[in-house]
Amino acid sequence: MEACKIKNLYNISETIAATLFERHEYPWELLPEIGAYIRELGESLDPALYEKRGEDIWVAKSADVAPTAYLNGPLLIDEGAQIRHCAFIRGNAIVGKDSVVGNSTELKNVILFNHVQVPHYNYVGDSILGYRSHMGAGSITSNVKSDKTLVVVKNGADELATGLKKFGAMLGDCVEVGCNSVLNPGTVIGKNSNIYPLSMVRGVIPANSIYKKQNEIAQKY
């Protein structure tokens, strides 16, 4: 499961949560700790750059937050981020620098690295989206298995138990997800990979690849 390790998916200098990533080997290990980490980090932020809005919500003064957006803590919105009309942030969320959370997009228990875009009708839950990753309109993470059993990450014949009931997707840096795709529980997508529109994705997708459909994955050259 080398491909699923934090060091092979993310440039952690591109998130305000770098010290949280340094504590772990696999990114999903962070998911139960996001809320507590935000509370810890929020109290240390420079009040000249960040303002506290209500309980456990910190928003950079340079961020652009629409008045119609719903914000629930724990939440940290970093510098230059855009939270657009009717975005729904349920809590335990870190929105990175210059990221976009768009109209009717819902976030819950997530970390968005810097320059991430989830701009149109996305659901992102129990997931981590790497630097400059992008989810096309209507693409979502499915974070609970239909039989409600614990999520196992599968890479061919290799399997790794996560111990988590809720686990959406881990997107490496510079991943592009096509419109109206579904990322099933336990999906891990390597750096610089593209997912075709209308895809149903599960398991580990290699870095630098193009996912066309199940069992049809091309390598980028």
Image: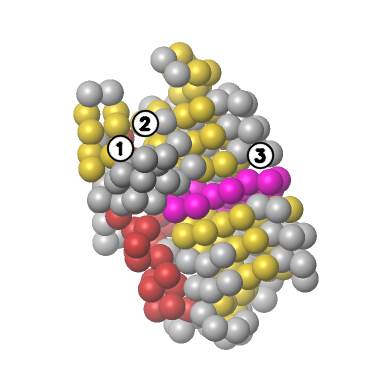
Circle count: 3
**What residue did someone put label 1 on?**
153
> At label 2, which amino acid type do we have?
Gly
Relative side of 136 to 75, left or right: right
Would you say the residues marked 2 and 1 are in contact, meaning their CB atoms lie under 8 Å apart?
yes
The percent coordinates of residue 14 (x first, y second) are 48, 55
The percent coordinates of residue 109 (x first, y second) are 47, 60
> At label 3, which amino acid type do we have?
Gly
At x 36%, y 40%, the residue is 147
As drawn, the label of residue 138 is: 3
Q: Is residue 130 visible?
A: no
Number of residues whose C-alpha sits closer than 10 Å to that of mark 2, classed few (under 14), some (14–19) or many (20 or more): some
Q: Residue furthest front?
A: 147
The magenta span reads 113-130
The percent coordinates of residue 161 (x first, y second) are 23, 43
At x 62%, y 82%, the residue is 53
As drawn, the label of residue 203 is: 2
